[in-house]
Image: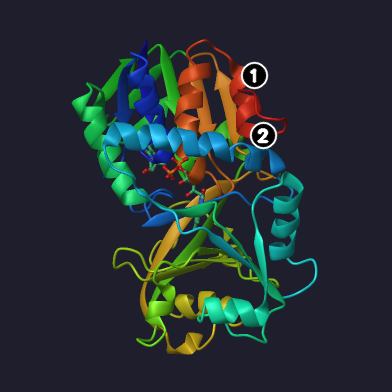
Amino acid sequence: MKTAIVGGGIAGLSSAWALTKRGHDVALYEKGPIPNPLSASGDEHRIIRRAYGGLSGYARRIDEAYEAWDELWADLGEKHLVENGFLIVSQRPGDEAEQYRDGLRAGGYPLELMCADEAAARFPFLEAGTFRYAGFSPEGGALLCRKIAAGLVKWLRNHGAAVHDDTRVTAVDPAGTVTTTEGARDFDLVIVTVGAWVLDLVPALAGRLTTYRTAVAYFTPPPDLAPAWVGAPVMLDAGADSDGYAIAPIGGSGLKLGTGNHKRPAPPDADRTPAPGEADAIRKWFAPPLTRLDEYRHEKTVTCAYTFTADQRFLMHRRDRLWVVSACSGHGYKFGAAIGRRVARHLPDGDEEGLRAWLEARERVDR
Ligand SMILES: Cc1cc2nc3c(=O)[nH]c(=O)nc-3n(C[C@H](O)[C@H](O)[C@H](O)COP(=O)(O)OP(=O)(O)OC[C@H]3O[C@@H](n4cnc5c(N)ncnc54)[C@H](O)[C@@H]3O)c2cc1C
């Protein structure tokens, strides 16, 4: 089938990979470079973890996510996942860390709980006395997005897919026509995976998706604390109201701090230059539980744009030959390779319900 994929983030690249493997004739269009640093998939890394609190359907899909990444690593000849596990830190009864703890317990997934003193001894970047307890799970880590994108582009080109970077799609239609700055072409299938820019191409989704702008900040720890971060797990939740996550310095990129509290509704191209003081606004959510955070040196701030559905599930929309697949709501990267495989499995047969059920994760996973 002649298939166009619009958008070269993880959803588009993985779909192109899986469809090419199944013999489809794939053309991928990306308006910027790949990876595009302005895309949600264009930062240094994203977290993969089992913990999911209330959205337990996604926790059950993590086995499939890992299987799909393993298939990708085998094809790329390289593994771009640092598996240091993840940490949750509870500061208050009922905080998000505690919800993750409960979700992990309910699913029967591994979690080692530690009192605050024990956790601070094992992870000296934590300040004992500022939190109640911590939990460590070996099932998690950091996916190295830029290496994954570069590997996928190389694989796609070596396997006959047409990868058109720096080519903006200006219109798509249900009959299968894709219009770029260079002209119009017809396809059997058109798959739109343009992340935060989806409303530009498919405005009908405006009621179902809200676009946000956020930022993450990178820091260098003081020299005596730096060894504590080497090989440290990703911190999935820093407790209390922080909605904060941290990724230890990997490959010279610094300690990354991010919080869901920093996001605000905005069009995807608005305010993409970090504002002065933005890194400190992010940093403040992490003290507590991180110790001596004011001694960390700010390196860079990276802005991001993404969309959310009201219930934080992924979204699928179809009109004839046109399909929109949105790995949205701030947790889609970890499923990137699995989404690609699911797109290749369901979409060429027109199995709209199969793809929707998997993406929305409302049921036990069908295998
Ligand atoms: C701050 C932040 C932290 C996150 N943390 C995590 C995490 O830890 N774990 C996790 O699993 N997920 C996480 N996510 C979510 C994850 O990053 C996204 O779910 C995922 O990257 C979305 O990929 P995508 O391919 O759908 O979209 P994107 O990566 O945004 O890709 C869309 C692409 O389409 C291109 N495009 C747009 N318009 C056009 C056009 N008209 N023509 C051609 N190309 C176009 C864009 O340039 C872009 O490259 C996070 C997101 C953010 C913003």
State the quadrant of the N terminus.
Answer: top left
- The amino acid pointed to by label 2 is Ala
Distance of mark 2 from mark 1, alpha carbons?
Answer: 12 Å
Q: Residue 353 shows which numbered tag? A: 1
The local crowd at label 2, few if under 14, some if 14 to 19, many if 20 or more residues have their Cα within 10 Å, is some
Question: Which quarter of the image is occupied by the C terminus?
Answer: top right
Could you tell me the amino acid type at mark 1? Glu
In the picture of the structure, the residue carrying the numbered disc 2 is 361
Judging from the image, what secondary structure is the residue with disc 2 in? loop
Image coordinates for residue 240, horizontal then vertical, percent = 70, 73
Q: Is residue 197 above or below residue 260?
A: above
Contact, mark 2 vs mark 1 (Cβ under 8 Å) = no
Asked whether the viewer can see residue 267, the reply is no
Query: Sequence-wise, which precedes: disc 2 or disc 1?
Result: 1
Residue 34, image quadrant: top left
**Residue occupying image coordinates x 45% and y 29%:** 340
